[in-house]
Image: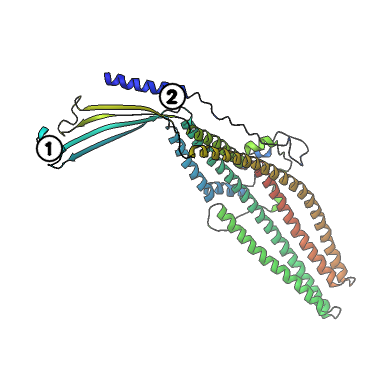
Amino acid sequence: MNIINKIKEILVSTVVVASAVSCMPKLALEKVSPELPEAFQYTATADTASVATLEWRQFFNDPILQGLIEKGIKNNYNLQIALKQVASSQERLKQAKYMQYPEVGLGVTGQITRPSDNSLNGQSINLFLGKSYVEDYNAAFNLSWEADIWGKIKNQQKVSKMQYLQTYEATKAIQTQVVAAIAQGYYNLLMLDKQLEIAKSNLELSKNTLNITEKIWQSGDATSLGVQQSKAQKEYTELLITQLEQNIKIQENALSILVGENPAKISRTIEMSDTSLPQNFSAGLPAAMVSRRPDVRQQELVLLESNALIGIAQANMYPSLKITANGGVNSFKFDNWFQIPASLFGSALGGITQPIFQKRQLKTNLNVAKIQREKNVLAFRQSVLNAVGEVSDALVSNESLKVQEQKAAEQVTTLKSGIQSAEKLYKSGLVNYLEVITAQANSLQAELNLASIKRQRLSSIVDLYRALGGGWK
């Protein structure tokens, strides 16, 4: 009982001393607030609602596109790697919860020592034990515990938590990128389909023009140059068709890989003109966007992690209280090794250690941690600025492309009427073949351009959805 009381006295004394020194001041860290505008540029009103609050299944209503996105979320390898990283961080977080508990270990040893017969130890063993060797058997529990006086362990737990949350936000950021990439690849495929349809339609016009030109040339009312020009226009369209078919296959391969499958044909049942995305949408407020954007949120967590690392670096400069104890059974004979209570032993040690001179390493670590926090503050502000810029770019692109699409559609209507007029006049001999070929070429280019602008507008809406933080729900 006396030994137990002594151990209690040691523990109480060290805790009292630790409490006395724990009143030393801790470093105060300023809270970082990003500089945000009241509303996004190019928005008429600052509406609190945002299209980014929609789940991706609500935002994209095309069943085929929904199926591709679902496959991508399930099978995309980059996303799967990110999920494995989340699982690893989660295991570290679970382990961090046990940091405040003592470490306990069990050791069992058996040792036989035979000293020299001519040594003092050897002669003493022979005299007292009547044998030339000595045995020692030991089985003991070892306990070690460090008191979290300065919050070092608490900050280490915060670091593990922030790192786990960073991997979680990184996964959400990758999912938003995967969803956007699949949608844009799908819309690009629909654009190529439309352009292929336009090219095939123009190929029929080119063939008709060539037939008419050949007949007029055979009748002597035109030169061979007209036939050559008409034939060249037809060959250009045929070449374009081949290029478009190639691009379609490449885009199908890219989409297949994006959803985690081997290259294969992508089925689609609708045309680009049948696609529908939210047209009248609100961007919401910049402050809400910051809380939704996974990449911005991840950078904010990096900043919070740096705060905890400063706390750890500061705590390392202060005294540390550590208590160790061990106890078990010990005997120099195997037969009575576990004889209770004769073989029992125990010891306890409580001490406070204050680092004094360590070649300026501790102060350097603290200063480096402070500088790293300053860097993370700047990185956080930059991520917010980039996010606001991406939203503004997507907004202005969408508005501009809306106007461009309208103008391009009007141009296509005008040029298609021009083809019909040119063909009638050509048959009547009022215009030459060059005007017919030029009208066909201009109409072809205008239709291809209209399809491209429609795809760009769809992409700008997808970009806005991702930039506002949508796609991970």
Q: Say which quarter of the image contains residue 12.
A: top left
Q: Residues within 10 Å of mark 1 (few under 14, many from 20)?
A: some
Asked if labels 1 and 2 touch by Cβ distance under 8 angstroms, the answer is no
Q: Residue at x 17, y 33 (%)?
A: 332
Question: Does any portion of residue 277 appear in the rendered image?
Answer: no
Question: Does any portion of residue 191 appear in the rendered image?
Answer: yes
Q: Residue at x 71, y 39 (%)?
A: 283
How many marks overall? Answer: 2
Residue 98, horizontal then vertical, whole percent: 42, 32
Residue 152, horizontal then vertical, whole percent: 47, 32
Q: Which mark is residue 123?
A: 1
153 displayed left or right of 229: left
Q: Residue at x 66, y 67 (%)?
A: 242
Q: Say which quarter of the image contains residue 226.
A: bottom right
Q: Which mark is residue 18?
A: 2
Residue type beneath disc 1? Gln
In this view, the residue in front, 216 or 472, is 472
